[in-house]
Image: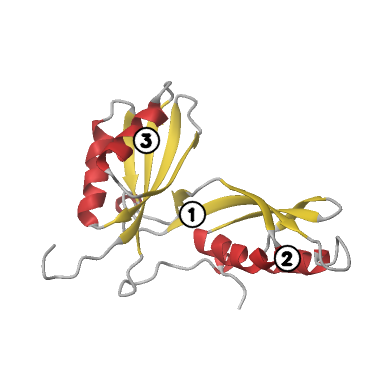
Amino acid sequence: MTTEEKHLYRHVIAALVTNEPGVLAQVASMFAARGFNIDSLVVGRTENPELSRMTIVVNGDDSTLEQVRKQLAKLVAVVRIVDYLDAAFVERDLMLVQVSTAGESSPIEHRTELIELANIFRAQIVDVSNDQLMIKMSGTEEKIEAFIDMIKPYGIIEMARTGVIAMSRGNATTARKAKAKVAVSPQANPPAIDPGDLPPG
């Protein structure tokens, strides 16, 4: 490491891959073998039935990102790599969470509070039982983490998250669509903020 401070960034990368058995295993094995710090890895279908879209969130410096790109490009199944560097893009994570509504006096003592909290964060109640609620929420990782912090005191029973998916905004130029970097370093400029992603307060 040089005397110049090394900045770590949160990079979001998308890769179009062919729909073949074992592609996800190949990518996961490549990341594990090289020790990359992968925060999220999501695979889903696209508008083309022959291709899947893989969205990867990796934490590291610029050299780490370059290694990730090079290693991905070596895989035969990878058709195209999109690194959202310095581009306006939208990202979403989806969460389902079961939260206890029980209190000292009643199994539904905190139900109203949790429903109000879900409304503030624009989440949805998707299931109700005698002593718990299931809440669905989508948004940025920061928004979801803020919501989790708010509901922890009530008691999280079970939680599942999809991981991050991302896409360039409609007004992004062709050159900007090829790149996107969101700095984790406090010295870096923050990305454009979607008001709908903001937590309350």
Q: Is residue 144 left or right of residue 193?
A: right
Query: In x, y percent, where is residue 12?
Result: 38, 51
- Front residue of 59/16: it is 59
* Residue drawn at x 57%, y 58% as measured from the top left: 139
User: Which amino acid type is shown beneath numbered disc 2?
Assistant: Asn
Front of the two marks 1 and 2: 2
Query: In x, y percent, where is residue 45?
Result: 51, 33
First in sequence, mark 1 or 3: give its number.
3
- Front residue of 7/98: it is 98
Q: Is residue 62 left or right of residue 189?
A: left
Query: Is residue 155 positioned above or below 15 on the image?
Result: below
Front of the two marks 2 and 3: 3
Q: CA distance from mark 1 to mark 2?
A: 21 Å
Which residue is labeled 2 in the image?
Answer: 119
Give the SS element for disc 3.
helix
Q: Quadrant of residue 125?
A: bottom right
Which residue is labeled 1 in the image?
Answer: 91
